[in-house]
Image (tube, coloured by chain):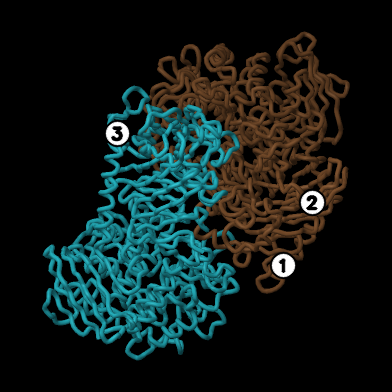
Chain colours: A cyan, B brown
Amino acid sequence: MKYGHFDRSRREYVIRNPATPLPWINYLGTQEFFGMISNSGGGYCFMIDARKRRITRYRYNNVPMDSGGRYLYVRDERTRKFWAPGWMPVKADLDFYECRHGLGYTVITGEKDGIRVATRYFVPFNESCEIWETDVTNTGRGTRTFTLFSFVEFCLWEALNDATNLQRTLNLGEVEIDGSTIYHVTEYRERRSHFAYFAASEKIDGYDTDSEAFLGRYNGFHEPRAVAEGRSGNSVACGWNPCGSHSIRMTLKPGETKKLNFLLGYAENPEDEKFSAPGVLNKKRVRATIGKYLKRRNSEQAFRALAREWDDLTGRFQAETPYENLNMMVNTWNQYQCVTTYNMARSTSYYETGIGRGIGYRDACQDLYGAVHIMPPERSRQRILDLAAIQWRNGATYHQYQPLDKKGNATIGVGFNDDPLWLILGTATYIKETGDWSILDEQAQFDNNPDETATLYEHLIISVRHIMRNRGPHGLPLIGRADWNDCLNLIMTGIKPGDTFQGDATHASLNDEIGSVPESLMIAGQFVWAASEFMRMAEHRKDAKNARMAARAAQAMRDAIVRHAWDGEWFVRAFDRFGKKIGSRHNAEGQIFAESHGWIGMAEVGKENGMLARALDAVKERLFSRHGIVLQQPAYTAYNFYWGEMTSYPPGVKENAGIFCQPTGWLTISECNVGRGDRAMEYYRSICPAEREEISDVHRCEPYVYAQMIAGPDSARFGEAKNSWLTGTAASSFLAVSQYILGIKPGYDGLLIDPCIPKEWDGFKVRRRFRNAVYRIEVTNPSHVSKGVRSVAVDGRKIEGRTLPDFRDGKTHKVEVVMG
Amino acid sequence: MKYGHFDRSRREYVIRNPATPLPWINYLGTQEFFGMISNSGGGYCFMIDARKRRITRYRYNNVPMDSGGRYLYVRDERTRKFWAPGWMPVKADLDFYECRHGLGYTVITGEKDGIRVATRYFVPFNESCEIWETDVTNTGRGTRTFTLFSFVEFCLWEALNDATNLQRTLNLGEVEIDGSTIYHVTEYRERRSHFAYFAASEKIDGYDTDSEAFLGRYNGFHEPRAVAEGRSGNSVACGWNPCGSHSIRMTLKPGETKKLNFLLGYAENPEDEKFSAPGVLNKKRVRATIGKYLKRRNSEQAFRALAREWDDLTGRFQAETPYENLNMMVNTWNQYQCVTTYNMARSTSYYETGIGRGIGYRDACQDLYGAVHIMPPERSRQRILDLAAIQWRNGATYHQYQPLDKKGNATIGVGFNDDPLWLILGTATYIKETGDWSILDEQAQFDNNPDETATLYEHLIISVRHIMRNRGPHGLPLIGRADWNDCLNLIMTGIKPGDTFQGDATHASLNDEIGSVPESLMIAGQFVWAASEFMRMAEHRKDAKNARMAARAAQAMRDAIVRHAWDGEWFVRAFDRFGKKIGSRHNAEGQIFAESHGWIGMAEVGKENGMLARALDAVKERLFSRHGIVLQQPAYTAYNFYWGEMTSYPPGVKENAGIFCQPTGWLTISECNVGRGDRAMEYYRSICPAEREEISDVHRCEPYVYAQMIAGPDSARFGEAKNSWLTGTAASSFLAVSQYILGIKPGYDGLLIDPCIPKEWDGFKVRRRFRNAVYRIEVTNPSHVSKGVRSVAVDGRKIEGRTLPDFRDGKTHKVEVVMG
């Protein structure tokens, strides 16, 4: 069953049934002020940090589901009945409902009994506020009088405190009301110079700033007292739960439309301009912003600028292939999701409360694959240098850091042994996209210590050496606390009931007897790739010594993989602390894994001797299900202390034989590496959100973005997705489809053309902006091959090889590619 | 307006209007399994630790208020309408509603359209389960068929994780259904050997274990799908939110009553008996408990045993005075609250989420004043030794510790300079009650280090010396990070917007230039008292050297107070980092404070020269309001960085001129110390919960227990209480009324009789169990004095002095006291 449809021309997902299986989310904001909004108006907004600067309140995992948000209520003054245009929270039957999620905006329209309310929510570029453009129309035949109520709940303080430290927070709430603007000034009198506001463009008939006064005692959001009675309480919050609510009574003739703007924002005052009178918020500066965006003319202009910006951003990669869903995903939604994962890290979604964690090391690096061509280069550059600065002298890196202070998270600590390699891969991605080699000469700290720095290039050398120095009995990389599979915890030592597997006090170190044995084939594959990238960088710097060091290291790792990890039909996943294989036909459960094959495949190890193709066949046969590639099979039915959290999940869920979507991207790439375009496409489609739209009642998550996980065949909920939006899948899918299937691959020297497509395709087109030039690439496939480029012509002239010239001339160049 | 009344004979508070201004709470459980239950069935239960072993889910500060709990629903099979006997969550109009909160149990009765459902909730002594005894009666004239649905939501894992780490927790849920019992076995397959269950005594017609299946998508607790449709989903949870719900269809003839039991429990299996088959919970052991308590005969027996226990506990102090509310509070509710504060520390109430904090140092010590006569001596003894073990060698103590591991909380750290003195006061309280001097010879660690221990007596010496060594320019105790007033932060150094004032990185140390100046008069008074107590202990041990040391120290402190802290009409509160007075007539705001006078008064400093009585008059005149004694006046209107969090609160709230109820107890004692029984009683009555019952719409909190705070006159919510139940007020009020007003005072050598009562009283009676003897004390006041004992007779014979013999003979002794 479908709950909506794609509006391809407007690049929107249109929801017509508000009772989606889960709230279907969109994001507002592009720089510092962000919001999350569901298809019925649920969600919240924050400034920079969802934990430390949350502006409005959202209660996660609540009953009813998706409670709290940007609510409007309409009360008919004749019948005294009320409803909400977003359906929630009142859930009155609507005559018409529609939610349009677009790039950086959402439009929610509801109509009932001849009144239509349509609101467009967005955050203007370079501003820290969200605009609600609300159009109210009398679609009936008689003149109508009704009252519109707005409602948000403020919580501008630390979000964990908001949820847990009630004896303090319930005492603090303070507000000021000034005309149609409600100022939330809790804690402003004292340490802070920031505040929030909620303004309306109309003269208001009443307001509420105290939630209980608005809602009424023991009432839910679906039955606010003020709305039921048609009368705001004009309450002034004093502690408890401050809110912002306006009431605006209006009378509309048939066909008449009233256009209102609401403005929900965050602002800061300079320390010396905090007050206009003792204890009174100085509103001078913010009034300019409020005044500006309450005018519809200005807000519409801001919206057009935002739309242009998104067109420009996503316009850097536009594909036209025979496969419509691929075009739509890669041109719009996949890139949009990549920018979102870049902006949010893993902090803020319907599943991530914004409290749990900072920015992940590998997450931030892998996000670059999907976003580096879109984000301003200086932002990617700074992020890479921030990541380098939380590396230790010995090469280990912190696993996470906090966005506000950029310090490594000491509670989680170091020891995830794939992390240092991601720094190499992230740097390579950046250089290939931008051609900016100078980043390698930038100084970056070790362990955030300003007294100890080295160039980024030295950081990368240290990363390579760290892995080589920390190898196990088979010459393969020690896994440390875990690799990409955070739940493959092979060096746990003291985990007890209730302990978190991610805790830092329960694992052996690499130098311990336990820690110096378990090896990861995922890291082994990743190392081959990363060392090869590093080698290219060393060559570019004419650093022959380190180029040679890396080349040898890569070869040694290839040899070790082929020698020790081949299990007969596929590669093993890891060796445990006893040196026993994990992911082997000799295991009773967990015989074969996806991740090791993804990375060995991406690194093209075993390609020449045929091992890789055979192993990938085994993956297809044993791990591919109708809902995607399962992480491993058979699922673990019992907990194994020595193998950690992976075995703790119920079968079919998460790391215990769930379908993690990200490895599907890796295996798509691997299939391209062995030239199998049809299977690559089959993989791509298996998790492509738009392909799953028809089974929304099974998939449950949004059909326009990837989810982290889909329940595997061992679960009673096989096919159900979870944790949508914030997943490395966005980047790995974009990498797979753009660079491997379509084969438009940024290289150190220019764009490399190397597609691997379904044989039946006649060809495809891609428009790619790359290093200040635009390439209009047309690929034809007269021989119906999957792989192989017969000729490349640029601006009408054949070129040698498959690498397009690095023009950087601000011009558009025509590229004709013939496969065969 | 009242929402209920006291049933004095049954010792219950009876609520007849369910829409209380705030949920009115009761506690279930006495040892390890605890529950919190509101008057409409809201709340949750946990095992030992509300953070680490929460069993059912409760979403704090939710909309609607008090959402989630122990719900029952009744669905009429003819009309298809449904309602809830506890009013919430359905809020259907009931024909009859009643909630009776008793000691360790709550009975909620609802009746509608001829069906009455009454449920008694309690936790049997020595068991880890709560019993719901549900009686369903057809009170109408025809035979009726209806379905009863039960509902709880499980969340047996770490509560902070439950609220923040959804990407994990939403994947884990697992259950087993066996007959009428639902087993919640999430994470049991792996690290845990514990689980939860929800059982019904009847054969059930259906069940649900998945919340969404029970509630329906986007539905609130007020509209569960299963109930609306009259049909359980028989859902088997697989991730998401596991719940427990039974449906039981029944047909009752007029007047017929059906008695059901539900059982909600926690259980552990031995590691080697976890499974009865691979992955299947071994239910053998727990079935015995379930079988037992599902039988009404057994549950009623358990209830009678529980009631006997509470009679016995509170029977240790029973007073009969001319003042009915005093009798009721002190005999029942105040003692009950004291036990609860002892059990919960400050972790679990409607305002304390169970996540925020461990056991506070001073909290735990002051709770002893109210609970030491009730709790088994070995529990008090252990707690004192646990507290000693988190003292440092230098005398400082951690400010909090976690109940599970008993380790000092390093995040908060040390430096609250009243803390070490509480250890002396707590120990003194224990010895006086029990006569058990041997505790002083027990070894206790320093800083939880097993290699470094000393006797408790040595810990106390160190405490005295720590304060004497850390005095400021006036010879008064340095305040350190704060004293009892956690928000009087005089040594803050780097607090920034968003920082917590309690953070450990933002204050100077005692050795810094800043830290070595600010002094606290609260600690000064407390020191005089504590040093005097220590002197008595040293004397008992014939340790003349330390007795002399303490005597001199106490005298030095008395002198310093009188010399430096007298401000002309009262004592100052503190000196800040610049040596400037806080709480002086020279200040513009915060001229006079309650806490310093409470402790100087309790220590009787300045009594001889009349300063104390004058200062207490000033307190009365300037701080006493119709809702109690304000913390200071005038309130601070602006934030002062150098004085900290106190000035950050809105005026009239919390530490900024709120009415903290605990100082009222101290000042009641102080008034007794200067012999003013009428004023002592006036203070006692001002915050006595039962006295405030009539103004429940102002007070809002429960009329049967103290709240931490009442908003002061500077607040728009003057008179509104907050943070009820878990407050040192319980102990300080019990101390004031039992030992100072009624004057039955445990001393080192026996019970001292020294009342200070209103002059109009003719006398009063107290039954006191003390060191294995019972004293039936009858006090007469023929001359209508407030203070002064003319004669004491024990068992018919006059004794010298006012101290009763320490019989310890298991017998009852008659004591006749004549005042005058």
Q: Residues within 10 Å of mark 3 (few under 14, many from 20)?
A: some
Tags 2 and 1 touching, CB below 8 Å: no
Where is residue B805 drawn, in percent x and y?
80, 28
Q: Nearer the viewer, residue B90 or B347?
A: B90
Task: Name the N-terminal-most of marks 2 and 1.
Answer: 2
| Label 1–label 3 contact, CB within 8 A | no
Residue B529 in which image quadrant: top right
What quarter of the picture does the C terminus of chain B occupy?
top right
Decide: is A357 above or below A631: above
Tell me the CA gap for discs 2 and 3. Answer: 63 Å
Along the horizontal axis of the image, is A576 left or right of A761?
right
Find disc 2 in the rendering and name its residue.
B261
According to the picture, the residue beneath numbered tag 1 turns out to be B282
Do the residues at pointers 2 and 3 share their chain?
Answer: no
Given the image, what chain letter belongs to the residue carrying mark 2?
A: B
Q: Secondary structure at mark 3?
A: helix
Residue positioned most to the bottom = A609
Residue hosting label 3: A291
x, y (%) of residue B663?
A: 58, 25
Which residue is pictured at 27% across the width and 63% down the height?
A: A372
Residue type, mark 1 in image:
Asn
